[in-house]
Amino acid sequence: MNVALSTLLIISSLVQVILGIIGFRHRDIAGVKAISLLMFALAIHSYAYGMELLSSDLASIYNWIRVEYIGAAFYPILILWFTRTYAGERRFANTYVMAVVLGICIITFFMVQSNTTHYLYYANLEVDTELGFSVLVTQKGLWYKIQVAALYFAMGYAMVVLINRLLKTRGVSRRRVGLVLAGMAIPVITSTIYLMGWGIGEIDLLPFSFVFLSVLIASGIYRYDILFFSEVTHEMILDTIDEAVIVVDCEGYILKMNQATRSLFGTLGQIKLGDPVGHFTVLAQLLKINQPQSLSMGDKHYQVRLIPIGKRHGTIVVFTDVTEIIEAKKQVELLAITDQLTKLYNRRHFVDCFDLLKQEGIVMLLDIDHFKNVNDQYGHPAGDQVLREMAQCLNEHFSDGVVCRYGGEEFAVIIEGETLENAKRRGNKFKEAFQFRQTQVPCTVSIGVCTYEKGNYSSTMNLVDKLLYQAKNAGRNALVSEDAVVKN
């Protein structure tokens, strides 16, 4: 009997090797590499268990167990890898989960190889001859239970994902998934029967379930080309991509392009298959630089990637529309340097501008007089309106400078290339315009103005701040410069 069983397993292992080789020829297709490696693992397990059944002494039997676990130890990670790749599901079977399961598999392999030194995988090993041939009787250790838990976790995950995929597909695709699901279900059932002790003596039924699994996959290849999981052609894939893709051969001629290329690019959209890239300046320049770069065309912005095809077969040029990202980034950057109430620049931007000054000019610091009284008498909404009126008036009078809300009711202006004398004249004109503006909340402004010292922000602002307070002390509604005091 053991000879017949062994023969069946050895034949099954040969079929699994053939299936693995066939699969490896299609290894670029999603999920096929994992299932091919799983076929090789099954083949090792099947062959070694067949040889185990032919062995008569404990030492020989255990040596074949060590061989079995070259494949069997890695079932959980291979099942997980296949399922997540085939179904494209990576939220649950994420990198962390994969790393943990792989770690368990690796430890299992070494635990089995060194079991006689610790007995953590098999607590005890004996040989039973009640069936007329030698069969290993084991007492499961702690790590055996951990490995079984990892295996059932992987198989359970695979069953759930495949059932979900089965419910969402139709036609040939559904039949393909159905065969994979059936092939996965058989080992689940047989391993459960073995672990519950419902099998034939101490014979491990799991390797025999691989026979049925092999038949299912072989019939699937014959009837449904089960290893070719995706029926989508390259052209269909290209045309469903929002990114513009142009394929250029090694001699600089256009081999392929998708619909997005024609719809997204004006001049480039007129290109035809077989055209030389030299006819299109933008494309030729991109290939000449031969590195990722940014490109602006009209009001659109693109990130361009160049992907080499092999070593000398050509280049895939991918244009990703990043207009929304760039505009959003600009908006975020603008918000970071803008005061939300007045829409003027904020103090941060004022400091940055000061650091970039290249020629002489003036700094003006302005403060709304008795602003606290405005809030107390008219309310904060009225105070906010005064701040907005101040901002509007500043923009009208100092459009050639950098105007910012310096803090609270204080505002600052930098005008590069302006003279102190002219700044005083403009400041007084602004002061009067603000005082007599049309408003429901009348108030005035005090101003300090001085020439700035390039590269010395602190000393400049200390000086203009002192001048502002002199204007306050002079009775407010005044402008004080570093060379004179002008009162109302």
Image (spheres, rainbow, N blue to C red):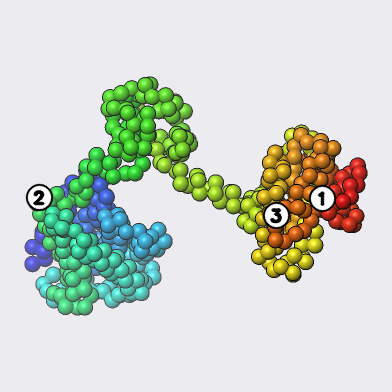
For the residue pair 146 and 329, the one nearer the viewer reads as: 329
Left or right for 206, reference 341: left
> Residue at point 18% right, 70% down?
190
Callout 3 amino acid = Gln
Residue 298, image quadrant: top left
Q: Looking at the picture, which amino acid does disc 1 mark?
A: Ile
* Inter-mark Cα distance, 3 to 2: 87 Å
Residue topped by disc 2: 222
The residue positioned 81% from the left and 37% from the top of the image is 422
Query: Residue 135, how many percent across, how many down?
Result: 18, 70
Q: Does the rendering let one see residue 375?
A: yes
Query: Dots 3 and 1: beta carbons under 8 Å?
Result: no
Q: Secondary structure at mark 3?
A: loop
In 3D space, how far apart are the residues under numbered discs 3 and 1 (Cα atoms)? 21 Å
CA gap between label 2 and label 1 equals: 89 Å
- Which badge, 2 or 1, comes first in the chain's sequence? 2
Q: Position of residue 100 (x, y in %)?
A: 40, 63
In front: mark 3 or mark 2?
Answer: 3
Mark 3 or mark 1, which has the lower sequence index?
Answer: 3
What SS does tag 2 mark?
A: helix
Question: Which numbered disc covers residue 447?
Answer: 1
> How many marks are shown on the rendered structure?
3
Name the residue carrying label 3: 438
Type of amino acid under label 2: Tyr
